[in-house]
Amino acid sequence: MMISQPVARPDGGVKVTGRARYAADYFAPDLLHAVLVTAPVPAGRVTSIVVDDALAEEGVVRVLTHEDMPKFGRFASPRAEPDTQMQQAEGPPAAQSFMPMQSNEIRHEGQPLAIVLGETLEAAEAGARRVALRYEFAEPELPAPPEWTAIDKAAVVPRESGFLFLEPTFTKGEVDRGLSDAAATVEAVYLQPSRHHNAMEPSATLAEWNDGELTLHDATQHVYGVRQVLAARLNVPAEKVRVISRHTGGGFGGKGWIWPHQVLAAAAARIMQRPVRLALSRANAYSCLGYQPRMAQKIVLAADRSGKLTAVQQDVVNLTTVSDDFVEFATEASKGLYATPAMRLSQRVERANVAMPTALRAPVEGPGTWALESAMDELAHGLGIDPLDLRLINHADTDPATGQPWSSKKLREAYEEGARLFGWRERPRQPQRDGDWLIGYGMATCSMGCFRHPTPAAEVRLHRDGTVLIRTGTQDIGTGTLTIFPQIAADVLGLPMEKIELEMGDTELPEAGPTYGSSSTMGVGSAVLAAAEDARSQLARLANLLPDEVEMQDGKIRRRGAAGGQTIADVMSHTDIGEIIGSGSFDPAQHGKGLAMRTFGVIFVEVGVDPGLGLLRLRRAVGSYSAGRIVNPRTAHSQMTGGIIWGWGMAAMEQSRHEPVLGRFLSKNLSGVAIPVNADIPGDVIIHFVDEVDEHASPIGGKGIGELGATGVAAAVANAVFDATGKRIRELPITPEKLL
Amino acid sequence: MDFHDRHLLRLRVNGEDHSLSDLDPRVTLLDLLRERLHLTGTKKGCNFGECGACTVHLDGRRVNACMILAVSVEGREVTTIEGLADGDALHPVQQAFIDHDGFQCGFCTPGQVMSAAALIEEGHTGSDAEIREWMSGNLCRCSAYPQIVEAVRAAAGRASQ
């Protein structure tokens, strides 16, 4: 059995030697380097773009402005069909409907206004500094001050612009009665700032046209999505667009949907009739790509004396741009976590002249658990019930929103095993001190919804010499897919990992969905499983065996339980077929009908707070998860550790501040925007998975884990800070001024 | 300096002598490696010395290649990630990163590995805390930090503390 083994990553060799190639590592003959000139103000219009000085710079070939650009086509959302409102909207995989460089209009600071093309990067950068912009400033819509009254006043009901994946309101049961009957109530507002992905690889695109066909090397989480959107924007048939992404240097949602720069690079290459590489600068990455928007959540929890919830009311407002209403559905956590008889949940947006937000690890339940799990801790303290017990008292045996049974849920086991690993029940209840540090303990429930994307096709080719080639148009962003897909095929075909090759990251390969939403193991993994089984069935028929009764081991096929068997080479030599092509797909509609699906878990943390200096440190953490079958515990361990560290970043330091005058991001570099570094993270981070197989979510038995680890952490940290200091922090990040 | 002057630069990269004529004085060591010599293993993450993805060895010391003008390294010796292994035999740090799952997307990995190899030479592996401190110039957004510390510790030949 290869599945469930901690197999080392086959991509290790190329990644530790520098041979793994990312989008900006490709070249083309006659390559032009592109550098963006961006808007210095958030609203208004450009009155002139003077390019003479730039063109005088040696090596600058051309400066493109909106006057040079073609009219970009509209992207018709795949969600458009049944819904008339959606006919007007775009939405994913397009990240935003607004395309810059179509007119002189400025909608946010940092919006691309011109593209300087140079024979060298140095020339293009120097040219970009010499482009003179004249503009008319318009009074911008600014983000409201970060407090509830102002945000509530600015909030509006979201319109459908392609990002309203769910109804913006949800009601169940008698909320008013639940509130008035309660023995204990918590009412609080939780704030979190805008926050960027800060992937180590800034997005980059190399665009090349040959005879009307476009080839793109791109940093993306979805090669097929890039093809779809670029074909629409550039008015070319999809089959004329090839997108290649062998390795992407971190996604986290930031490269999930398709942003304007990808279109602009391709348009520039078409105008110039030369290959163009547009590698975003680190500063560009703050305004040309998305971010998790600033959010405010007002939550009311009501419970009876025993701690049972009687009602939950939650109002969520997230910031969005003026063109599209991105909605961050934090209320999903409240819909899915606890057995609540009554709920009244609402999502609104606050529009401003800021860049378009997007999904960020973890979206939805990431912000949702920050508010809900903080409020649950407040409720536990108010009632004098242990925070873990309060969760157990309110455990949801069925989906609270729909009443549907779960496809699989082992959260009780996750709580119990996690608590044991952490020593939660034995933790000291009296204030603890370690030198200057006050010590505190906190916990929170983790959960993510199950995003299952269809995978139309995957191929497993079995060769006469007993080697295998897996072909799928999914992409590597580091999550472990390069390891687990070969494991899955090796398992079915009874071959060692060395015999299995994997080709990914190219629209020439069978179509696969995006690598986001923690969806690849279920989607692509199940399609690879089906393709490998198909290859085995074809081989069985050639061997005159019944496909349903065979097993393969050590390169041989035989009736299950029988001894010996025929080698692959022997079976295939009966025919003139050099290879067997197994194909498979995954259609979520065929699995788990009528069942609610989620992943679950719990995070326990120990923090230290230095009250004199306002410092906050993570001392240790235990994450214990119920997420279905774990195909590779080694890569899964890294996914969860990474998620917890993302959660620590959200809790303790990450923010992209909007300055109050123009709403621009105050810092657009990694000096001004703190993200966790090695010294922030203790070695004592324990990851545990409950033994579980969810056969309903997908044939693999697994669910998604990429985002789960990042949920709950911010609340657990704030709860631990409260335990240490008695201070309840309701605004992220928990920086020193809030602790002094 | 007039940016339109052109310079002759000789340097040694991964044991190989290079002579570049007509070099633009604005070219950084990072862009020289990537765009002129096509050694793309050295990554551009920020171009401002903030992330460490471009870490290389200059005369044996670790530096951020984005912070160094190429013309200033005349006659000096540069080792990049492509030159760290001894032929097909991986450097112990490279092997340790594989063994301890010290990466995910791999983009920061060349910089991490170059930094770790120098760190061991510098003698900054006395404790896990020391490793963490001296590896903190190399950001990893996948956040493989605990595994990176394990890899560096193993490569330095120390037992767990």
Image: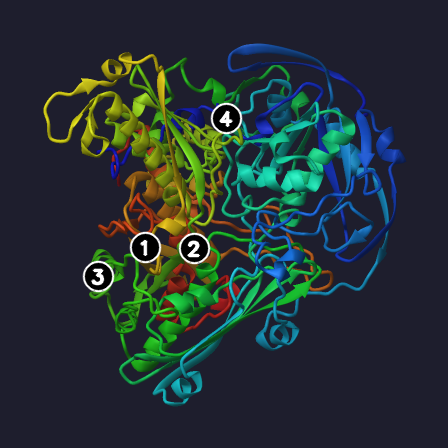
Query: Which numbered disc, 2 or 4, marks the residue closer to the eye?
Result: 2
Q: Are marks 2 and 4 on the same chain?
A: no
Q: Where is residue A561 in the image (x, y as percent from the top left)?
A: 11, 30
Q: Do labels 2 and 3 share a chain?
A: yes
Tag 4: Cα neighbours inside 10 Å, few (<14), some, or many (≥20)? some
Q: Do the residues labelled 4 and 3 touch (CB within 8 Å)?
A: no
Callout 2: helix, strand or loop?
helix
Tag 1: Cα neighbours inside 10 Å, few (<14), some, or many (≥20)? many
Left or right: where does residue A608 sit relative to residue A169? left
Q: Residue drawn at (25%, 25%), measured in percent from left and top? A: A541
In the rendered image, which residue does mark 3 sit on? A416
Question: Where is A578 relative to A103, above or below?
Answer: above
**In whole angstroms, how far apart are the C-alphas of marks 1 and 4?**
35 Å
Q: Do the residues labelled 2 and 4 touch (CB within 8 Å)?
A: no
Q: Residue A621 shows which numbered tag? A: 1
Label 4 sits on what residue type? Arg
Tag 4, which chain? B
Label 1 sits on what residue type? Ala
Q: Residue drawn at (63%, 45%), measured in percent from left and top? A: A259
Question: Where is A153 relative to B80, above or below?
Answer: below
Query: Which numbered disc, 1 or 4, marks the residue closer to the eye?
Result: 1
**In whole angstroms, how far apart are the C-alphas of marks 2 and 1?**
10 Å
**Viewer-closest of B33 and A2:** A2
Q: Are marks 4 and 3 on the same chain?
A: no
Query: Which numbered disc, 3 or 1, marks the residue closer to the eye?
Result: 3
Q: Where is residue A616 in the image (x, y as percent from the top left)?
A: 43, 60
Q: Give the mark nearest the N terminus, 2 or 3.
A: 3
Tag 1, which chain? A
In the rendered image, which residue does mark 4 sit on? B61
Q: Do the residues labelled 3 and 1 touch (CB within 8 Å)?
A: no
**In whole angstroms, how far apart are the C-alphas of marks 2 and 4?**
32 Å
